[in-house]
Image: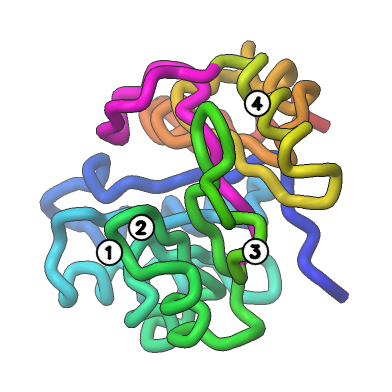
Amino acid sequence: MAFIFPKLYPILDSAILPANGRTEFLTRLGASLTDAGVTLLEYRNKTGSDAEILADAAALRAAMPADRVRLILDDRADLVATVGFDGVHVDAGDFTPAEARVLIGPDRILGTFGGSDALLPGILDAPADYLAVGPVFTTTTKHTTKPPIGVEGVRELRAEAGPNVILSAAAGITLDTAPAVLAAGASMVAVSAAIFRAQSPAAEVHRWLSRLS
C-alpha cells in the first residue's frame, strides 16, 4: 500500500541534541516519538560531519522501526541508502531533485522546496513526492531571506499546484495556527521548534495529533 502522508511532519534539527550522551538521547527520543504516533520524521544536520550524521541516523533508525516510521534525511541523498532511511529532502543548493532521485532510487520518498510566493518554474515536473512551501510564518530554526507568506499564501500555492500535489507547509507554525494552514490547502505541516523545544516532545506530538485529527 502506498504511504499516506500524515498531517504532522516533525523535523528534528541536530542543533537541539546534547553534546554528550547523544546516542542514548536519540534512542529514547525516537522510541517515545514512535509510541506517540509519529509516522514521518526528518533528521536535519547542516553542520555535522559524515560520521556524526551516520551515528545519529543509526540511533534513530534503530529506535524508529521502518514498518512504523518513515525517516527522511535532509540534504544528503548520497547517504540515504547507507543509513537505511526512507527518503531525502533537498533544497536549492543541495542535490537537484533529479540528481537525488538517481541516488535514492525510484521507491524512496523525495521532497524538495516548491516555492514561496509562487511555485518555482517547472517544479511540478520534478520527480518529487512532496513539495515544501513557505516560510508560512517567521521562523527561528532555519535561516531564510524570504518573507512569510501567511495562510493566504498557502491557499494561493494550493490553487497553483492543483489538488493532487502533496504540499508541506513549513516555518513558524504552532498548534494554534496549524489547523488554519491545513484548511488553506497544506497536506501536512512541517514543525521543528514547536515540538522539539517542548519539555516533552512526545507529549507535544500527542497534543498535535489529537488536535489535527
Residue 202 visible in image: no
| Amino acid residing under circle 4 | Val
Q: Is residue 212 left or right of residue 73?
A: right
Mark 2, residue position:
26
Q: CA distance from mark 2 to mark 3?
A: 36 Å
Q: Which residue is mark 1?
A: 23
Disc 2 or disc 3, which is closer to the eye?
3
The residue segment tinted magenta is 128-149
Give me the C-alpha separation between circle 1 and circle 2: 5 Å
> For the residue marked with disc 3, what is the amino acid?
Asp
Residue marked by disc 4: 154
Q: Nearer the viewer, mark 1 or mark 3?
A: 3
Could you tell which of marks 1 and 4 lies nearer the N-terminus? Answer: 1
Q: Residue at x 72, y 16 (%)?
A: 180
Camera-near label (1 vs 4) is 4
> Upstream in the sequence, badge 1 or badge 3?
1
- The picture quadrant where one finds residue 57 is bottom left
In the image, is residue 165 above or below residue 69? above
Distance Cα–Cα, label 1 vs label 4: 37 Å
Local packing at callout 4 (Cα closer than 10 Å; few below 14, some 14-19, many 20+) is many
Mark 4 → mark 3, Cα distance in angstroms: 20 Å
Question: What type is the residue that disc 2 sits on?
Answer: Leu
Q: Position of 201 compared to 12: left or right?
A: right
Q: Earlier in the sequence, mark 4 or mark 3?
A: 3
Tell me, what colour scheme is on the image?
rainbow
Q: Dot 1: few (<14), some (14–19), or many (≥20) neighbours within 10 Å?
A: some
**Residue 99: percent from left, percent from top:** 42, 78
Question: Circle 3 sits in a helix, a strand or a loop, which is it?
Answer: helix
Mark 2 burial class by Cα count in 10 Å: few <14, some 14-19, many 20+: many
Mark in front: 2 vs 4: 4
Q: Would you say 101 lies left or right of 152 here?
A: left
Q: Secondary structure at mark 2?
A: helix
